[in-house]
Image (cartoon, helix red, strand yellow):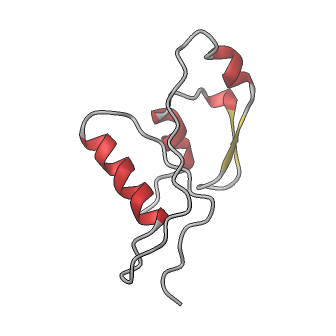
Amino acid sequence: MLLPIGEVAAAAGLEGDEVDLYGRFKAKVSLSVLERLAGRPDARLVCVTAITPTKFGEGKTTTSVSLTQGLGAIGRRPVLCLREASLGPV
């Protein structure tokens, strides 16, 4: 079940005036966040690209979700952004 985007934004440390909600599950984040967080160290970015899926359908989405869950399990605060979630095998 999806969490409301307001809860996700709060958990990520965003302030109320930095998030424009578009319904319950979508939002835009203000560029003012960059100014507020300018003094903090940069985060790390992991891009998952060009994986050939296995015959069981394990590809970029499965790898990304598993990596995010694994980082969360060891106490990190990961954020996952999928351009388009998989619709499954066709």
Counting the numbered discs, the total is 0
Q: Position of residue 13 (x, y in %)?
A: 51, 27
Residue 51 vertical position relative to residue 55 in the rendered view, above or below? above
Which residue is situated farthest in the left direction here?
A: 74
Q: Position of residue 2 (x, y in %)?
A: 46, 59
> Does residue 65 appear left or right of residue 34 in this picture?
left
Residue 39, image quadrant: top right
Residue visible at 54% across and 38% down in the picture: 9
Residue 20 vertical position relative to residue 37 in the rendered view, above or below? below
Residue visible at 33% across and 50% down in the picture: 69
Q: Position of residue 62 (x, y in %)?
A: 41, 65
Which residue is situated farthest in the bottom direction here?
A: 90
Which residue is situated farthest in the right direction here?
A: 31
Residue 14 vertical position relative to residue 60 in the rendered view, above or below? above
17 or 68, nearer to the observer: 68
Residue visible at 29% across and 47% down in the picture: 70
Residue 57, image quadrant: bottom left
Residue visible at 36% across and 50% down in the picture: 67
Q: Position of residue 72 (x, y in %)?
A: 31, 41
67 or 33, nearer to the observer: 67
Quarter of the picture holding the N terminus: bottom left
> Does residue 49 appear left or right of residue 72 in this picture?
right
62 or 12, nearer to the observer: 62
